[in-house]
Amino acid sequence: MKILNSKSLLATIDNFNEAHFNGDDWRPDQDNIVEWISGRLGKQGGYRGSFGMTPSDWNRDFRLFTGERITTRAGRSHIIAEEANRVLKVIESDTGSEISALKESESRLGELIFHDPRINAVKTGHFCCATCSVAMWRFMSKGGFGKHASLVRKGIDRLKEVSTPGGWGRYPFYYTLLALHEMEVPAARAEISKQEESCLRRLKILEKKRDKYSRRKRDLILRIVGDSV
């Protein structure tokens, strides 16, 4: 699978996330991925000077890995920055090398998100909007913003407060489920377990669909409730 799309940061990140999710080997393309994503640092539209999408990306349908649409410009800018950070962090952790563009992006975003201990992100682990917060947790669960790692647990506590048998209110169900699944900590597993019945109901609907986002959602649910099906 070719991961790098030199015309689209959105597509490159989605391709990488697909390979990582499926356990496919992205390593043969890793140097090109790092070089190209690093080159997007500070480009026009980048959130707080982080990684900016290409001009053509702004005309694309912006979807999260699990298919939820993002329509606001600020939301797109922030989420793609967190997702780009996450891609580089996964590569950095696997190779043991240091990616200078990732370090700079973390610094720039961190100055905005964590600069004041009185703001929400520091107190609750929630920043900006619900979806942006999940994107931030996905990066942090891979080691991003290391000094603030405890905020992931605060984010889970926030989900506990708004949890219902069908989801987490404004937090996008599948994207949040994916983030919790990847955290691999007891608190996250406990929160996932509350949604098992909802997952089983959703699985019946997803089995009738063939688009890539439905496939990803189905595969995610099967990893979580496999023994219950």
Image (tube, rainbow, N blue to C red):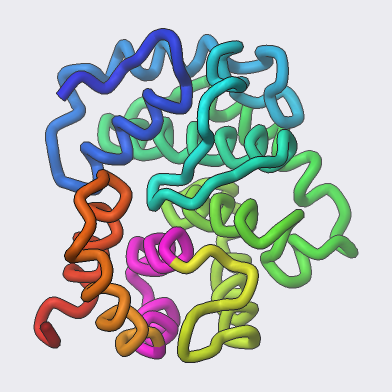
Q: Quadrant of residue 180?
A: bottom left
Report x, y in % for residue 216.
26, 53
Above or below residue 228? Residue 151 is above
Residue pictured at 59% horizontal, 34% vertical: 81
Residue pictured at 25% horizontal, 65% vertical: 206
Q: Is residue 177 magenta?
A: yes
Above or below residue 105? Residue 100 is above
Report x, y in % for residue 201.
29, 82
Q: Is residue 183 magenta?
A: yes
Q: Quadrant of residue 25?
A: top left
Residue pictured at 47% horizontal, 65% vertical: 176
Q: Nearer the viewer, residue 137 or 11?
A: 11
Report x, y in % for residue 32.
31, 11
Above or below residue 114? Residue 51 is above
Report x, y in % for residue 80.
56, 35
- Image mark count: 0
Start-end of magenta stretch: 174-194
Instruction: Assign the magenta stretch its main secondary structure.
Output: helix
Image quadrant containing the N terminus: top left
Q: Nearer the viewer, residue 42 or 104?
A: 42
* Residue sitting farthest toward the front: 208
